[in-house]
Image (cartoon, grey):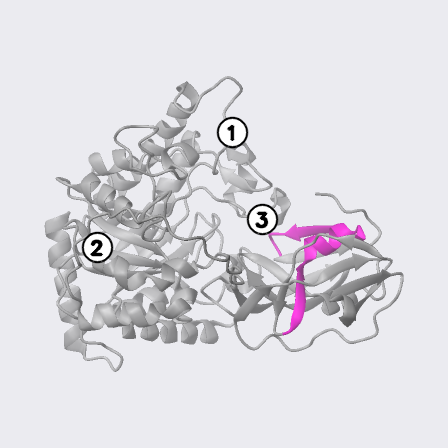
Amino acid sequence: MKNWNWCKKMSVFAIGASMLLPNTVAFAKAPPHDMRAVWISTVYSADYPSTTNHPTAQKQEFMEKLDRIQALGLNTVVVQIRPKGDAFYTSVINPWSAVLTGTQGQNPGYDPMAFMIAETHKRGMEFHAWMNPYRITTSGTDLAALSGDHIARKHPEWILTHKNAMYFNPAKEEVKQYIVDSVAEVVQNYDVDAIHFDDYFYPSNYPLPQGEGRDGAVANERRSHVDDLIARVSKKIHSIKPNVDFGISPMGIWKNNTSDPKGSATKGAEGYYSVYGDAKKWIEQEWVDYITPQIYWEIGNPSADYETLVKWWNDAVEGTDVDLYIGQGIYKDNIAAGMENKLKINEKYPNVDGNCYFSLRDLLQNRKGVADAVKAYHTKGSQPAPQTPPVVQPQKPEPQPQKPKPTETKTAFAGRTKIKIDGTMMDLPVYIVDDYSYFKLRDIAAAFRDTEKKFVPKWVEEEMAIHLETNQAYTEPVSINTSSKDTMAIPSSAKLYVDGKKQNTSAYTIQDYTYYKLRDVAELLDFEITWSEKDATISMKSDMPYTK
């Protein structure tokens, strides 16, 4: 596919230049395979959309983000259009995604993917349709929470569960055909440039039967089922539209060389064993047109050095028609901070044809200056990478006084969420930190003031502690306005007591307030908490006990 890719990408750049769009940037000297991409995650509305039931706002948001992406010198968006067995497009196979309207199966009133593709191509950029093949839920095993037309409700025998989540069973022939049909529907009906799978295959570390080893018959059978799906998806895509690529973004480590001499000199989690994904085979068989390994480690990492892995994947695609793009985990501060050096290292390896950044929110927030580095590199060119200096063993240093470790800050993403307490609906401001929801303790207290588990939080300055006193009603109002913008979360050093007993629950300080996970509060105060996937609602019952 490389010859076709060369023509395709050169024509894309020519179209982009000729259109002279207002936000078009002057691309630097670029080889024909120079993919400059960003993942746009829709699960949890992580990157998009920030509104529900508002087509005009969703369209405007996407166009604004496209303009900002293009201004950074990027030429490709990888948009998650099937996050949980659902759809951001018109489908007769999969229900509409709940992310669009708040209710799975509800028509959003327009075709989001058709709109997104048109706007992307208008800017001379590529649109890669990111589909998660097997995931049904991120949390929850209640089939009734799915929309009535979800195929998992119609075929519960297709499902396997793991760690309170549901997945389509990769071993089922019916599942394979359903996924192939889902891909075919998109390729047939939409002008996508590629179909993109991420690193989720079997659930991570899905247990083997007792007595079975990770290279045994059952493990090999699981890998064979995943291989079969990959081969069939590839064949189907190219039978419909030969000019549509198929790409996969596997875990950054195929195997460590302690597991297999052909593996990398690393000591991390291995995709071959963790999720039964044999990415090396997919390359060798040329079932994929491109591979985007998630090399989410920094330069010099003792367990998984960045350059070590870039070189391994560079060698893995050598002699094949598979393009190599490096997945960059810029949601990590140490990855975002060192991006300029990573991009220069890539220049040393002839088979590295581009990069893909995860994810959009971190890029647009310029985490640790990553957007500045990306824009400077992709719009102004770069100098050749310096040769790696010889390793010199340092003299044993004199003992130095230990410096305190810096406080690890996280990005807190602002929003609101629906909750139901003893049947009463309300919504609360929330911050998402590392994909967990954190609520202001005072808002939780206000929401519970008329329940059996009412409590009052009190700050005791001299103790630097929060005291929760139960069986008392909190009188302050719940927050009305949503948090205006994303901000930083700092691990809280405040101690927590419940009726005088010290607890070990962690929390974050955000905008000078202390935020806790709602589930942690439920455990402390002993009330029931459940999540409804269908309604995207957290439900609590104060008269029922907490269960894990």
Q: Which mark is residue 207?
A: 1
Q: Which mark is residue 342?
A: none
Left or right side of 528 for 34: left
Q: Where residue 247 sits: x, y (%)?
A: 28, 48
Three-letter code, disc 3: Leu
Q: SS of the residue at dot 2?
A: helix
Q: In the figure, 358 relative to 204: above or below?
A: below
The mark nearer the N terminus, 2 or 1, is 1
Tell me, yes or no, whether the highlighted magenta stretch contains residue 303: no
Q: CA distance from mark 2 to mark 1?
A: 36 Å
Q: Residue at x 44, y 30 (%)?
A: 172
Left or right side of 377 for 364: right
Q: Which mark is residue 146?
A: 3
Three-letter code, disc 2: Asn
Q: Which residues are magenta?
A: 512-535
Q: Closer to the camera, 234 or 375?
A: 375
Q: SS of the residue at dot 1?
A: loop
How many neighbours does mark 2 have within 10 angstroms: few (below 14), some (14-19), or many (20 or more)? many
Q: Where residue 262 sits: x, y (%)?
A: 25, 31
How many neighbours does mark 1 have within 10 angstroms: few (below 14), some (14-19), or many (20 or more)? few
Q: CA distance from mark 3 to mark 2?
A: 44 Å
Mark 3 vs mark 2, foreground winner is: 2
Mark 3 vs mark 1, foreground winner is: 1
**Image label count:** 3
Residue annotated with mark 2: 346
